[in-house]
């Protein structure tokens, strides 16, 4: 059974990665989203096991000690991690897997994976637009919002470390670009597996 590709998607808060990913998941067959574990409280409309695996800090630290996580990080005062077993299960099924993780987690994955994943950074069209989106979401108080904005500025300094950059000005356009990246990487992977392709024409 073939093993799928890994796509790492990072973005600052307010970039709209959840909305973009939803459209991509609907458009691209054979694609799975790795569901992270987190200690943060669920938001309105979020379901355990669908958006995140919600857990408490004691259980999360137990999972760290057991080596259950491929990567984990503490972001905005909450802990997030990617289960090794869940990822390996999806890849073994031949699915391509998207890891929706922050820049700390992405760095860990790049250091640990024998074959580097495809990395994509999603950004809003401007910091002002990012702040507008975060305020419209109305899920944090002013202190938490300020922390997210400060962290976002730090995260965007590592954009050059990613292979692809997608600007989410319009969700439909960003989703189309991300889907195109996935299809292009699939085609590249198949070519590398099969060796150099034969010429398409003889030149006569």
Image: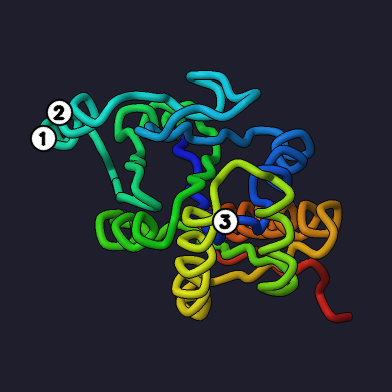
Q: Quadrant of the C terminus?
A: bottom right
Residue at the spot 48% in from the left edge and 26% down from the top edge: 93
Q: Which mark is residue 13?
A: 3
Residue at the spot 71% in from the left edge and 74% down from the top edge: 126
Q: Which mark is residue 65?
A: 1
45 with respect to 72 (left or right): right
Secondary structure beneath dot 2 equals helix
Tags 2 and 3 touching, CB below 8 Å: no
Tags 2 and 1 touching, CB below 8 Å: yes
140 with respect to 178 (left or right): left
Count neighbours of disc 2 (C-alpha within 10 A) and say few if under 14, some if 14 to 19, many if 20 or more.
few
Q: Nearer the viewer, residue 37 or 181?
A: 37
**Residue 152: x, y in percent?**
51, 67
Tags 1 and 3 touching, CB below 8 Å: no
Q: Which mark is residue 62?
A: 2
199 with respect to 95 (left or right): right
- Which mark's residue is nearer the viewer, 1 or 3? 3
Secondary structure beneath dot 1 equals helix
Position above or below: 10 against 153 = above
Mark earlier in primary sequence (1, 3): 3
Residue at the spot 46% in from the left edge and 61% down from the top edge: 147
């Amino acid at each position: 059974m073939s093993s799928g590709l890994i796509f790492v998607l990072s973005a600052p808060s307010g970039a709209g990665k959840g909305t973009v990913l939803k459209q991509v998941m609907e458009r691209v067959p054979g694609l799975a989203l790795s569901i992270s574990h987190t200690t943060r409280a669920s938001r309105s409309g979020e379901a355990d096991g669908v958006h995140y695996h919600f857990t408490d800090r004691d259980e999360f630290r137990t999972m760290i000690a057991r080596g259950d996580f491929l990567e984990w990080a503490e972001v905005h005062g909450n802990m997030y991690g990617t289960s090794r077993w869940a990822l390996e299960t999806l890849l073994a099924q031949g699915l391509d897997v998207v890891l929706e993780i922050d820049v700390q987690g992405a760095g860990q994955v790049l250091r640990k994976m024998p074959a580097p994943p495809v990395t994509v950074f999603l950004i809003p069209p401007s910091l002002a637009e990012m702040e507008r989106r975060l305020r419209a979401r109305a899920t944090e108080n002013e202190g938490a919002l300020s922390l997210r904005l400060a962290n976002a500025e730090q995260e965007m300094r590592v954009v050059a470390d990613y292979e692809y950059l997608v600007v989410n000005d319009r969700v439909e356009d960003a989703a189309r670009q991300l889907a195109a990246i996935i299809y292009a990487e699939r085609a590249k992977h198949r070519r590398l597996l099969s060796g150099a392709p034969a010429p398409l024409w003889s030149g006569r």
